[in-house]
Image: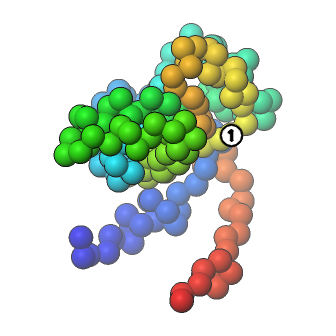
């Protein structure tokens, strides 16, 4: 891994990638969603805990279940997106550690509920970042958002309480007409130190 990616690849993943508010009328296949998962799963997590859980909403019926939880500003774009991903975390991720981290019994490391929550939330968020990059890498555009009622989403889709939604991301092939003017970003000197 000593070579820098091409400018075209860096543009697709970062520099020209945007948060889309609308998508073209072009379906996203289940095979494409599998490709996204197959890439994101290789990203590192603490003790390989892999707490991210994803529910892909593609059908009108599934989207209708989500409707009551969406804020007014995010409703139309979510209902019209080809796919809406609920990015959640498994509160009992440690049950899977014998499979995912087999060289030592790591389950006791997460016996403290505060440590377990912090680990699940942090690492699922990290994996959700991998999700965005993986989606972009396979040619999808993303519309991540926080504007929803977390309690309603959890009650509707994760009623047993084991999984908890972190954030939502619309997926598809972005409609350039839906983009806002690009917002500024910090420069290196604004936010970084080298000690």
Instruction: Evaluate whether residue 82 shows in this view.
Output: no
Residue at 33%, 46% (x, y): give it: 48
Q: Looking at the picture, how far across and down is residue 53, in whole percent?
A: 44, 31
Residue labelled with disc 1: 146
Quarter of the image containing the N terminus? bottom left
Depicted 2 relative to depicted 63: above or below: below
Query: Residue farthest to the top?
Result: 61
Residue at 67%, 50% (x, y): give it: 179
Residue 72 falls left or right of residue 141: right
Dot 1, how many residues are within 10 Å of its Cα: few (below 14), some (14-19), or many (20+)? few
Relative to the observer, which residue lies in front, 137 or 53?
53
Residue 138 falls left or right of residue 92: left
Choose top left, top right, bottom left or bottom right for residue 109.
top left
Quarter of the image containing the C terminus? bottom right
Query: Count the marks: how many?
Result: 1
Q: Looking at the picture, how far across and down is residue 166, in whole percent?
A: 59, 37
Q: Looking at the picture, how far across and down is residue 129, in whole percent?
A: 49, 51
Residue at 27%, 40% (x, y): give it: 105
Q: Looking at the picture, how far across and down is residue 49, in whole percent?
A: 37, 42
Residue 144 falls left or right of residue 131: right
Depicted 71 relative to depicted 125: above or below: above
């Amino acid at each position: 891994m000593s070579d820098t990616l091409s400018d075209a690849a860096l543009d697709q993943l970062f520099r020209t990638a945007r948060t889309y508010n609308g998508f073209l009328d072009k379906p996203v296949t289940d095979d494409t969603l599998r490709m996204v998962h197959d890439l994101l799963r290789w990203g590192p997590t603490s003790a390989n805990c892999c707490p991210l859980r994803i529910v892909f909403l593609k059908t009108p019926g599934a989207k209708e279940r989500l409707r009551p939880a969406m804020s007014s500003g995010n409703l139309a774009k979510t209902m019209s997106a080809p796919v809406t991903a609920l990015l959640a975390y498994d509160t009992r991720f440690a049950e899977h550690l014998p499979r995912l981290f087999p060289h030592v019994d790591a389950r006791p490391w997460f016996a403290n509920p505060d440590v377990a929550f912090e680990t699940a939330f942090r690492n699922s968020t990290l994996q959700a970042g991998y999700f965005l990059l993986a989606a972009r890498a396979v040619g999808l555009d993303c519309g991540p958002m926080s504007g929803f009622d977390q309690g309603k989403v959890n009650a509707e889709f994760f009623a047993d309480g084991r999984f908890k939604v972190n954030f939502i991301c619309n997926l598809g092939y972005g409609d350039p007409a839906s983009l806002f003017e690009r917002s500024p970003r910090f420069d290196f000197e604004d936010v970084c130190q080298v000690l």
